[in-house]
């Protein structure tokens, strides 16, 4: 009988720790997602909607009227407290003498644009309707 060569023990290669690798990778991905969501939340979120409307002449008129009214209201309150305005009629006159000229100036811009677009000899009901239809929301 022939002598057999001694058996060599072969150990299987060390297995890759897939489970721990996947879990640590999943943790990292989860932290990245949580960080991104927290960042968006901290920044005020993502605005969902049609977005800002483009500025038009009507918006400019109303913005002018609002800002004028608000600033004049503060000035009028100071004048009332300082004793410069002594009656309700004086208060109304004070406000209208300052508000109306600024409001009229804002409306003149709008009305001038409209006159150029459809006024005078070129006026038709359809031209005016087409122009002012864009004001509706």
Image: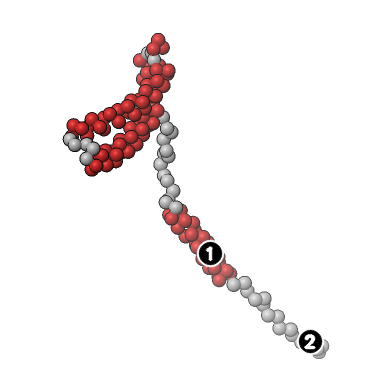
Q: Which mark is residue 109?
A: none
| Residue 73 percent location from the top left of the image | 28, 38
Mark 2 residue element: loop
Considering only vertical position in the picture, is 95 above or below 15?
A: above
Number of marks in the image?
Answer: 2
Q: Nearer the viewer, mark 1 or mark 2?
A: 1
Choose between 22 and 58: the one closer to the eye.
Answer: 58
Mark pair 1, 2: CA separation:
54 Å
**Seen from this angle, which residue lies furthest right?**
2
Looking at the image, which is closer to me, 44 or 62? 62
Task: Indicate which disc residue 4 carries.
Answer: 2
Give residue 28's mark: 1
| Res 65 quadrant in image | top left
Q: Is residue 135 visible?
A: no
Relative horizontal placement of residue 30, taking residue 6 as reference (left or right)? left
In this view, 24 is above or below 38 = below
Residue 74 at x, y percent in the picture: 29, 41
- Residue 118 at x, y = what percent? 40, 16
Q: Is residue 9 visible?
A: yes
Q: Residue furthest front?
A: 83
Give the residue drawn at x 42%, y 18%.
117
Colour convention: secondary structure
Task: Give the vertical position of 29 relative to 103 (above or below).
Answer: below
Q: Do the CB atoms of the residues marked 1 and 2 lie less than 8 Å apart?
A: no
- The residue depicted at 43 percent of the width and 54 percent of the height is 41
Residue positioned 68% across, 80% down in the render: 11
Q: Does residue 48 appear to the left or right of 28 in the view shown?
A: left
Q: Position of residue 124 (x, y in %)?
A: 37, 13
**Image-quadrant location for residue 60:** top left
Q: Name the residue nearer the viewer: 16 or 4.
A: 16
Quadrant location of the N terminus in the rendered image? bottom right
């Amino acid at each position: 009988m022939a002598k057999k060569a001694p058996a060599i023990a072969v150990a299987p290669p060390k297995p890759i720790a897939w489970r721990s690798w996947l879990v640590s990778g999943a943790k990292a991905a989860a932290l990245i997602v949580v960080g991104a969501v927290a960042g968006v939340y901290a920044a005020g979120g993502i605005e969902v909607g049609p977005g800002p409307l483009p500025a038009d002449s009507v918006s400019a008129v109303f913005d002018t009227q609002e800002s004028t009214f608000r600033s004049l209201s503060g000035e009028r309150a100071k004048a009332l407290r300082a004793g410069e305005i002594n009656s309700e009629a004086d208060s109304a006159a004070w406000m209208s003498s300052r508000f109306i000229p600024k409001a009229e100036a804002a409306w003149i811009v709008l009305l001038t644009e409209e006159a150029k677009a459809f006024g005078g000899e070129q006026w038709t009901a359809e031209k005016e309707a087409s122009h002012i239809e864009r004001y509706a929301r």
